[in-house]
Amino acid sequence: MDETAHKVIIVEGKSDKDKLVSILDEPVEIICTNGTLGSHKLEELAAAIEHRDVYILVDADDAGAKLRKQLMRELPNAEHLYVHRMYREVAKTPLIYLAKVLLGAHFNINKNCLG
């Protein structure tokens, strides 16, 4: 875990993480769940990041909704970020749209992503 980053974004997969890395212009730990998490693994994750600013950004589909619900229970103070349903997946969301979502949550972003 990257303890130097005060902010944490939880995403589903590596392609989501790669997309965010290309947009962010500050140290942020991006954690991939690779789908749903078992309750033990989820408790470990929650304990490891409980004193940090946590954001949840998952796909706008059934699997993403299930994961978001699971994360809500363990991380009630997390801030939820959303992609538009028409894009469905974080990885398929246009850079400029994701950049605006992150900007709205007060992340520093790479200015090149704003077009």
Image (cartoon, rainbow, N blue to C red):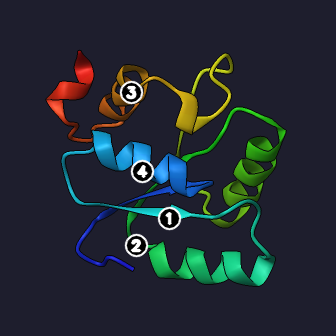
Q: Where, by quadrant of the figure, is residue 100 drawn?
A: top left
Q: Which mark is residue 31?
A: 1
Mark 2 or mark 4: which comes first in sequence?
4
Residue closer to the observer: 105 or 88: 88
Q: Position of residue 94 (x, y in %)?
A: 45, 23
Q: Which mark is residue 95?
A: 3
**Which circle, 1 or 4, is nearer the viewer?**
4
Q: CA distance from mark 1 to mark 3?
A: 19 Å
Q: What amino acid is at disc 4?
A: Asp
Q: CA distance from mark 2 to mark 4?
A: 25 Å
Q: Are marks 2 and 1 in contact (CB under 8 Å)?
A: no
Mark 1 or mark 3: which comes first in sequence?
1
Q: What amino acid is at disc 1?
A: Ile
Q: Is residue 34 left or right of residue 9?
A: right
Q: CA distance from mark 1 to mark 4?
A: 11 Å
Q: Are marks 1 and 4 in contact (CB under 8 Å)?
A: no
Q: Tell me the SS state at disc 1.
A: strand
Q: What residue is shown with label 2?
A: 51
